[in-house]
């Protein structure tokens, strides 16, 4: 789905997931170095690291797959 | 005492760190950026109100689902699953899937081919301006009221969970929605709803995953719930983890309902009414680019709707099994909101049913993940509000302003009216939120009022689509009789609570059962009155019903499309998975 311009809705979604994923992974790494005073339940599973990584990779996939350059090329090919 | 005032002195459930705030602020910036980006593509009526009718099946389908996935829906039904057990999942399964598939395969062709802008618009084409006016005025009025009530309830939740000021929550979230909908119209609302759909899953999915790890899987969860409820001497503890086997009698399950109410009241009437005629959700699929996309969109929505219990119902059940007082280590027993928010409840540190999702979020999610979870709740609220506002704007502009006030309005003036209407709609919603803050009981009444219109509207629309003999007078009087009978039954039970044994067929029936049976009766009354009046009045000639009624509407064949691209194939797959889920959780 495109907007009429060169930015697809999927690009926005990728951007959102990638930024959130990067922030959460960053926090996870920080907690490895400096564990929090109050741990959440199942802290030992380090959910912020692997869940953040999943979001980051998914977001990057969407950003690359639906990047403005690729969308412009696709729209040019269709016209 | 006013709960908003009482909550000013209560401790909050969670505390956000700077990293959480970064995630929340980024979300607000992104949705506003999307609205600004799409402003240039909302210049005509078709662009602003129907998103140019160029959405793909995936985008329309996810927006169709997301418009319904408000944060109150998420927290309210998580609370209901804590209260009623897995019976709450019926609102996501039989209370949604058959209706969504019915919309896709049976009703979408008529909505799509007649090119209507709205459900009241279809009623005008089929039954004339009387039915359109009745339907559009009631829808517009109730939509903005509901939007305000949701806004207030969301602000209260933000106060309880985060300690945020109620005024700040109301103004920031509603003004953000107003800006991006006024700028980009339905396209902007849909884009943001799809984004919000992903954020809701990203923020909420971790709770059931970690919860099942902690509980020892589904079997461990069931065993813990059984043990906990038995220890607390709760009646029928096994009923909390079985969806159907306890529905033989009103007294065998915590919801006080039987299978007739669930199957016929919820599955055949209420859900059909909501998912096929409530313009809030139907508008999303009307924006699809072609008929095949319009039919596939509700099927895609249904596939994901079946999975929503994983992030809504399961956290409620996990709360039943795992939540403990952090100080004493004893089982934490959640209570009704009125009790939790009373002076006594606050003094004892009680929590309401609806707080189960934030409690589980705080249990597993540290900084970062917590911000994402809170963003999911905010996103849910905003997608629901954007749905209400964009639907209100369209119905007001086309079915009230364009049909009753200025019949010669140009396309440009309609777009201008749409932008202003967005501002006014949000303004009325904010006003309603403050009204509810000062008169809390209005909330319960308006939520019940909304249900009065849905069931009879489904009766009118479905007869209009499937029975060409239905007449203009039949449609109008059937809709009016169904609506009035619903209001009448509700008032009867309010005045005389013993009347529940007539309305819901049992004096043991509880609130949910009453709603189901009331919907069933008023739908039947609507259908009977429509049929009787239609048979007594002169029908329209067939030529005037082309593209509106079954048998008179040429529906394109799909013979040239591969089986994997046919909506009916995917509807069968979704239907089969739905049946398997019912058997697994029987």
Image (tube, coloured by chain):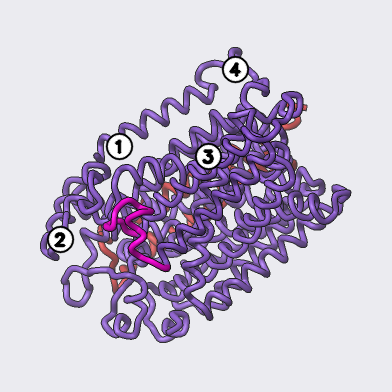
Chain colours: A red, B purple
**Circle 4 SS class:** loop
Among numbered discs 2 and 1, the one appearing first in the sequence: 2
Q: Quadrant of residue B51?
A: top right
Question: Is B30 included in the stretch rendered in magenta?
Answer: no
In the foreground, B360 or B398: B398
| Residue at the image position 55 percent from the left and 39 percent from the top | B61
Q: Which mark is residue B528?
A: 3
Among numbered discs 4 and 1, the one appearing first in the sequence: 4
Q: Which residue is mark 4?
A: B558
- Mark 2 vs mark 3: give the one in front: 3
- State the separation of the CA atoms marked 1 and 3: 32 Å
Among numbered discs 1 and 3, the one appearing first in the sequence: 3
Measuring from the top left, give residue B39's x and y in whole percent. Answer: 76, 53
Q: Quadrant of the N terminus of chain B?
A: bottom left
**Circle 1 SS class:** helix
Subunit that carries the residue with mark 2? B
- State the separation of the CA atoms marked 3 and 4: 35 Å
Q: Are marks 2 and 4 in contact (CB under 8 Å)?
A: no
Measuring from the top left, give residue B304's x and y in whole percent. Answer: 45, 41
| Residue at the image position 47 percent from the left and 28 percent from the top | B571
Q: Which residue is mark 1?
A: B582
Q: Which residues are magenta?
A: B495-510
- State the separation of the CA atoms marked 4 and 1: 31 Å
Among numbered discs 3 and 4, the one appearing first in the sequence: 3
Q: Quadrant of residue B34?
A: bottom right
Q: Are marks 1 and 3 on the same chain?
A: yes
Give neighbour class at mark 1: few <14, some 14-19, many 20+ (Cα, 10 Å).
some
Q: Is residue B514 left or right of residue A15?
A: left
**Circle 2 SS class:** helix
- Mark 2 vs mark 1: give the one in front: 1
């Amino acid at each position: 789905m495109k907007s009429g311009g060169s930015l697809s809705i999927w690009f926005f979604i990728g951007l959102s997931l990638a930024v959130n994923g990067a922030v959460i992974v960053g926090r996870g790494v920080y907690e490895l170095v400096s564990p929090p005073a109050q741990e959440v339940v199942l802290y030992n599973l380090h959910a912020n690291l692997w869940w953040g990584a999943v979001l980051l990779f998914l977001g990057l996939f969407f950003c690359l797959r639906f990047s403005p350059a690729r969308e412009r090329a696709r729209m040019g090919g269709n016209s | 005492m006013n709960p908003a005032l009482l909550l000013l002195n209560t401790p909050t459930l969670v505390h956000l760190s700077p990293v959480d705030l970064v995630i929340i602020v980024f979300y607000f910036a992104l949705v506003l950026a999307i609205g600004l980006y799409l402003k240039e593509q909302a210049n005509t009526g078709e662009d602003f109100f129907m998103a140019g009718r160029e959405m793909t099946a995936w985008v329309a389908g996810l927006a169709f689902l997301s418009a319904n996935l408000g944060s109150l829906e998420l927290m309210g039904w998580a609370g209901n699953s804590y209260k009623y057990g897995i019976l709450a999942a019926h609102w996501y399964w039989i209370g949604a899937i058959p209706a969504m598939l019915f919309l896709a395969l049976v009703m979408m062709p008529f909505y799509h081919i007649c090119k209507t802008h709205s459900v009241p618009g279809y009623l005008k084409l089929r039954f004339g301006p009387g039915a359109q006016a009745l339907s559009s005025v009631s829808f517009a009025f109730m939509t903005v009221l509901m939007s305000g009530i949701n806004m207030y309830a969301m602000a209260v939740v933000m106060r309880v969970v985060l300690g945020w000021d109620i005024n700040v929550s109301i103004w920031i979230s509603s003004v953000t929605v107003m800006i991006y909908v006024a700028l980009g119209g339905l396209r902007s609302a849909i884009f943001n709803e799809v984004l919000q759909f992903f954020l809701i899953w990203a923020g909420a999915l971790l709770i059931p995953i970690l919860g099942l790890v902690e509980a020892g899987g589904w079997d461990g969860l069931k065993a813990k719930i059984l043990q906990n409820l038995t220890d607390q001497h709760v009646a029928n503890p096994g009923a909390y983890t079985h969806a159907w086997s306890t529905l033989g009698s009103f007294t065998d399950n915590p919801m006080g309902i039987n299978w007739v109410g669930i199957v016929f009241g919820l599955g055949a009437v209420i859900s059909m009414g909501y998912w096929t005629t409530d313009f809030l959700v139907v508008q999303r699929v009307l924006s699809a680019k072609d008929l095949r996309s319009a039919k596939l969109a509700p099927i895609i929505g249904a596939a994901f709707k079946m999975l929503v219990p994983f992030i809504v119902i399961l956290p409620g059940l996990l709360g039943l099994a795992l939540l403990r007082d952090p100080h004493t280590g004893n089982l934490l027993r959640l209570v009704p909101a009125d009790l939790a928010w009373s002076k006594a409840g606050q003094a004892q540190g009680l929590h309401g049913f609806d707080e189960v999702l934030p409690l589980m979020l705080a249990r597993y999610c540290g900084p970062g993940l917590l911000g994402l979870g809170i963003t999911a709740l905010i996103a849910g609220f905003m997608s629901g509000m954007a749905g209400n506002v964009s639907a209100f704007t369209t119905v007001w502009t086309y079915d009230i302003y364009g049909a009753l006030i200025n019949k010669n309005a140009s396309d440009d003036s309609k777009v201008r009216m749409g932008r202003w209407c967005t501002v006014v709609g949000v303004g009325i919603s904010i006003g309603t939120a403050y009204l509810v803050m000062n008169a809390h009981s209005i909330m319960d009444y308006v939520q019940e009022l909304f249900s009065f219109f849905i069931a009879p509207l489904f009766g009118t629309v479905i007869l209009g689509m499937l029975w060409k003999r239905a007449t203009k007078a039949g449609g109008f009087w059937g809709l009016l009789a169904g609506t009035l009978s619903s209001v009448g039954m509700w008032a009867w039970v309010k005045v005389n609570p013993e009347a529940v044994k007539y309305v819901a067929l049992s004096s043991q029936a509880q609130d949910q059962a009453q709603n189901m049976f009331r919907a069933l009766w008023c739908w039947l009354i609507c259908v009977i009155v429509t049929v009787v009046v239609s048979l007594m009045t002169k029908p329209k000639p067939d030529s005037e019903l082309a593209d509106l009624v079954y048998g008179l509407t040429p529906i394109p064949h799909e013979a040239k499309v591969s089986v994997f691209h046919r909506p009916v194939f995917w509807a069968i797959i979704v239907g089969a998975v739905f049946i398997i889920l019912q058997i697994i959780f029987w």
